[in-house]
Amino acid sequence: MFSVLLSFACAGWIQAQDAPAAPAASASTSDPSLARRPAEKPAANETISLTVPKGTPLQVALDGEVRVAKVGQPIHGRVVEPVYAFDKLVIPVGTEATGQITKIGSVPGGKRTAAALDADFTPAHKIEVEFTSIKLPDGREIAVHTVVTPGSGQVIEFVSAADRSGSKKGQPNAAEEKAAEARRAAKQEWANAIKQVKEPGKMHRLGHYAVAQLPVHPQYIDAGTVYSAELQDSLDFGTEPLTPQLAASIGTTPPDGSVVDARLVTPLNSATSHQGDAVEAVISRPVFDGDRLLLPEGSRLQGSVIQVHPARHPGRNGELRIVFHDLRLAEGLQQKMDQKVEASLAGVEAAKVDNVKLDSEGGAKAAAPATRFLTTTAEVGLGAASFLGDSFGETGPRAAGGAGGYKLIGIALGLAVHSQPFGMAMGAFGGTRAIYANFIARGHDVVFPKNTAMAIGIATRQPTGTTPATSPVAQQ
């Protein structure tokens, strides 16, 4: 009996020696993260985690105006910037987002007093909101926890860089033509995304403006107001296999003239930023060349501020110019990429009230609103009317002078105080105030909050013997 057992044991040992060793468990199987496998022979069973990480912003535009009433009041909007995980679209444009008003801030005493003098007894409160749910086009609802980043909550427009004049005989080269086409496509895409917002018509806006001039009036949040709502928890959309073809193409630098979508990680302000300050942006949409993935979502662009001028008196607006000079793959990829590039703004989403313009090199400048001439002319006209006589007495000139000073309160004082010199003084005050505010006061700064959406033009050329702070772009 013992000899039989010994025979079976020896046979099993011999078979174990002849059999091939079992493969070790893949690290990606136990940890399906964005661990990068060797490009030459990627493991066939390796997967990529399609996760939207914590801190990713959802760009949500209100699709209808909201009359502010109370905390807890529901709000509704739609996503206007697509959200990707690695190379897959997971939250498309048009995704519904619901939330609520979380806080109606108090108005400082000084602001309240100034508003009251201008016949406004209901000055605007600062409104805070949050979004708690998104509904994908396929009907799936996902609960989210978000925090709106500072600086958002404004009506936004897409600003494209001006076209270059061309390098030879006024004709742009192939890369410049490609970049110009990409800028136009980005602007059109923004226009298509914002079409889902129920923007009010001209008569509706005029009605709102008239109501806002009343001493007591409701407060509205305009349709089209865009909030950047950062996710406080990651969202998991499953995994996908990493094919050899996908692995082999990752890390290739986009060709000259390419424009990539990114969001700003470093907030910028021409009033507080300095030349040489570091700037970082994260690529928010994967970059493809045909069906080949070059750069996954999450790849980084690093650069610096190369030119900055804060707003100054009299009426001089701020300027800001940034360039990106390093391109790196998304964190977690084993294959490292640190490619030197030339990259500048090809387009940017900015608040309409800031009236930002981009030159052909991507430099940003705040421009004065065209309405300043109209408003100044109106105020000066009211002031001039107070110096004119009136066939029915001095009531008309006094009222006109008061209106130029402090709106309805000024009119009331002009009618109550039976003195034409008083009306003249109020009119002169109103005209002078308008001239100062529109032409003499400190201008407007260029402000790009964190998570500002940008289109960035990329090239692989790097001037020899220069650094980002002394590149030719800085001297233009």
Image (cartoon, rainbow, N blue to C red):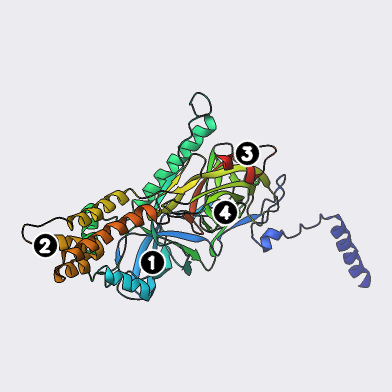
Q: For this rendering, which residue is in front, 4 or 344?
A: 344
Q: Residue furthest left?
A: 392
- Mark 1–mark 4 Cα distance, whole angstroms, equals 26 Å
Q: For this rendering, which residue is in front, 107 or 172?
A: 107
Residue at 61% across, 50% down: 303
Is tag 1's residue or tag 2's residue first in the polypeptide sequence? 1
Q: Are marks 3 and 2 in contact (CB under 8 Å)?
A: no
Q: What residue is shown with label 2?
A: 394
Q: Which mark is residue 98?
A: 1
- Mark 3–mark 4 Cα distance, whole angstroms, equals 18 Å
Quarter of the view holding residue 457: top right
Q: Are marks 1 and 4 in contact (CB under 8 Å)?
A: no
Instruction: Give x and y (percent) for residue 124.
Output: 33, 69
Q: For this rendering, which residue is in front, 373 or 259?
A: 373
Amino acid type at circle 2 is Glu
Q: What residue is shown with label 3?
A: 460
User: Can residue 201 be seen in the rendering of this structure?
Assistant: no
Quarter of the view holding residue 106: bottom left
Q: Which mark is residue 282?
A: 4
Instruction: Give x and y (percent) for residue 159.
Output: 43, 46
* Tag 1 secondary structure: strand
Q: Are marks 3 and 4 in contact (CB under 8 Å)?
A: no
- Mark 1–mark 2 Cα distance, whole angstroms, equals 56 Å
Amino acid type at circle 4 is Val
- Mark 2–mark 4 Cα distance, whole angstroms, equals 65 Å
Q: Quadrant of the C terminus?
A: top right
Amino acid type at circle 3 is Thr
